[in-house]
Image (cartoon, helix red, strand yellow):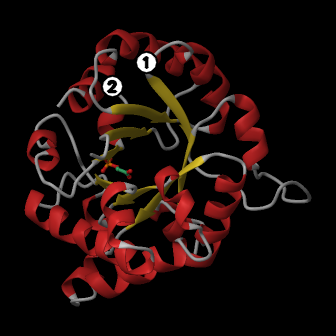
Amino acid sequence: MRTPIIAGNWKMNNTIADTKALITDLIPLVKDAKAEVVICTPYTDLATAVEMTKGTNIKVGAENVHWAEKGAFTGEISANMLVELGVTYVIIGHSERRQYFGETDQTVNARVKAALAKGLKPIICVGETLEEREGGKVEEVLVRQTTEALKDIAKEELGNIVVAYEPVWAIGTGKTATAEVANDTIKIIRDTIAKLYCPACAEEKVRIQYGGSMNPKNVKELMSMPEIDGGLIGGASLKAADFSLVVNY
Ligand code: PGA
């Protein structure tokens, strides 16, 4: 069985002071969660988050990582730097990065490789835009994004990889994919991984989350679907009460 994983994506929210308050509230609320609990924070909050969550069931993730080990890349952060901080997970290829910061399938793949090489667990985001869904391109887009992201990644690494299916039209819009649509679309991703590697690899190793306006109200239904192994939570991860309700679905 695949262990469910609920991850918060704080995006560009929370100062260190906000982080301290939020994590203090969160720790007792999620301590008995059945799901693996992750919070992905801005770089500036990572040290505080790692320190505060030591000895708890909360793991910490970053929201991006550069593909190079080091060098002249002003403003970037390497996998080594994250590992040294005690970071476990890293979101890669979020649609906001693809949309606003020129992220491509190729740079996603380069970042995934760099993360895995240093022992970070990537949460790889894929998902179609509204235009692509309406144009009947969902399968084409997801097969391409998944295949490119996993290019040259060894089968042995699959257990360290999480995929987040995030339809772009559902992010921060309050519009959630219905549980059936999310489930069917995640099945396309799992089938793609099965073809690239092997059916058992896709079935047993890779956890696939849904993301896009997941919240305390819709989490139960989404998590009841057989293909959905967790959630990547934006807005609802910024309040301890809401995030704990999602985590304890
Ligand atoms: P949302 O964001 O939950 O606010 O829709 C999800 C995400 O972008 O990861």
Residue 11 point in image, percent of width and height: 49, 44
Element carrying mark 2 = loop
The quarter of the displayed image where residue 74 is located = bottom right
Please tell me which of labels 1 and 2 falls first in the chain: 1
Give the image quarter of residue 165. bottom left
Q: Which image quadrant for residue 193? A: bottom left
Which numbered circle lies on residue 22?
Answer: 1
Residue located 28% across and 16% down the image: 32
Say whether marks 1 and 2 touch (CB < 8 Å).
Answer: yes
Question: Could you say where residue 64 lies in the image, as x and y percent from the top left?
Answer: 61, 51
Question: How far from the left and from the top, in percent, is residue 228?
Answer: 22, 53
* Mark 1 crowd level (few <14, some 14–19, many ≥20, 10 Å Cα): some
- Which residue does the image show at 28% across and 88% down from the upper left? 137
Q: Is residue 7 left or right of residue 180?
A: right
- Is the shortest distance between ligand 1 and the CB of mark 2 under 8 Å? no
Name the amino acid, label 1: Leu
Task: Give me the disc on residue 239.
Answer: 2
Gap between marks 1 and 2 measured at Cα: 7 Å
Q: Quadrant of the C terminus?
A: top left
What kind of element bears circle 1?
A: helix
Say what amino acid the circle numbered 2 marks: Lys
* 122 versus 177 height, above or below: above
Up-down relation of residue 104 to residue 235 (above or below): below
Local packing at callout 2 (Cα closer than 10 Å; few below 14, some 14-19, many 20+) is few
Q: Residue at x 23, y 46 (%)?
A: 214
Mark 1 beta carbon near ligand 1 (under 8 Å):
no
Point out residue 245 in the picture as x, y percentages from the top left corner. Answer: 21, 26
Q: Is residue 227 left or right of residue 161?
A: left
Q: Is residue 239 above or below residue 109?
A: above
